[in-house]
Image: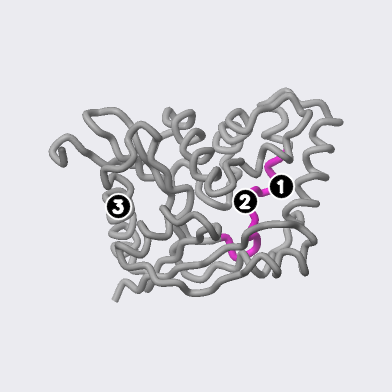
Amino acid sequence: MRDSLSIRKAMSADIPFLARIEYEASLPPLNQCFWEDILHDTGTSALQFIEAELRADASNWGNVADFLILEEQGKPVAAAAGYMPNPENYCPLRLSCLDKIAEDLNWSKEIATIFRDRYRQFWGGDLRPFFLTPQAPWIIENVAVLPEARGRGLGKTLLKALLEEGRLQQHSHAGIMVINGNEVARHTYESIGFKPYQTFHADYFIEQFNIEFPGITKFGLCFK
């Protein structure tokens, strides 16, 4: 099987596939993409928004050039992003790019304003929430394997390639974040050497943001 696998850098033509990967990566363990609540009643699906975000180079959590794609027999089946975190903004979207996204999606000013207000309420605008503080100079995000290709170790193969890229860039260590309860992801990351670094439990999100959320655990891996 390994002879049929190849890994390459993503290109702009891959944006529809990368949007699906980002969407799949956002689902577990709650089975819901966080963009869906923000996009409610805008007439835009999460996939449509993620594609526009990628076209606008507007993500703080991995743009097109940050992704590696794993192909099986020439077909993309998995992807993940590795990047140096933005020191000014830890949230997923660069709001300065929202006008470009709105134009791409043909949003009215009213819809763009609704989205902006909801995003700020959800993420705090361009603030730097403490729980999102990067724990490493090389962050891995948006890791997903298409449902039909899961269960065969493809995620590990892709992650090892992404870690090698981090080593080649001479970073000291890598970080990755998991929503508590996503045991499949946790097991995969621990199996290739990641160790728990810091956990924010559900009560943290109740106290700080008045929301019910299972919390997150950050993992780190030292390259040396």
- The part of the chain drawn in magenta is 86-98
Tell me, yes or no, whether the two marked residues, 3 and 1, touch with CB atoms within 8 Å.
no
Left or right: 132 in relation to 11 = right
Look at 42% across and 43% down and name the residue there: 144
**Of helix, strand and loop, which one carries label 2?**
loop
Q: Position of residue 64 (x, y in %)?
A: 46, 41
Mark 3 to mark 1: distance in Å? Answer: 33 Å
Q: Label 3 crowding class (10 Å Cα cut-off): few <14, some 14-19, many 20+?
A: some
Q: Residue at x 65, y 48 (%)?
A: 93
Using residue 127 as the reference point, say whether residue 176 is left or right of it: left
Q: Is label 3 in a helix, a strand or a loop?
A: helix
What amino acid does circle 2 point to?
Pro
**Residue at image mark 2:** 92
Along the line of sight, the residue nearer the viewer: 9 or 183 = 183
Residue to which mark 1 is pinned: 95
Q: Is 88 included in the stretch rendered in magenta?
A: yes
Q: Are marks 2 and 1 in contact (CB under 8 Å)?
A: no
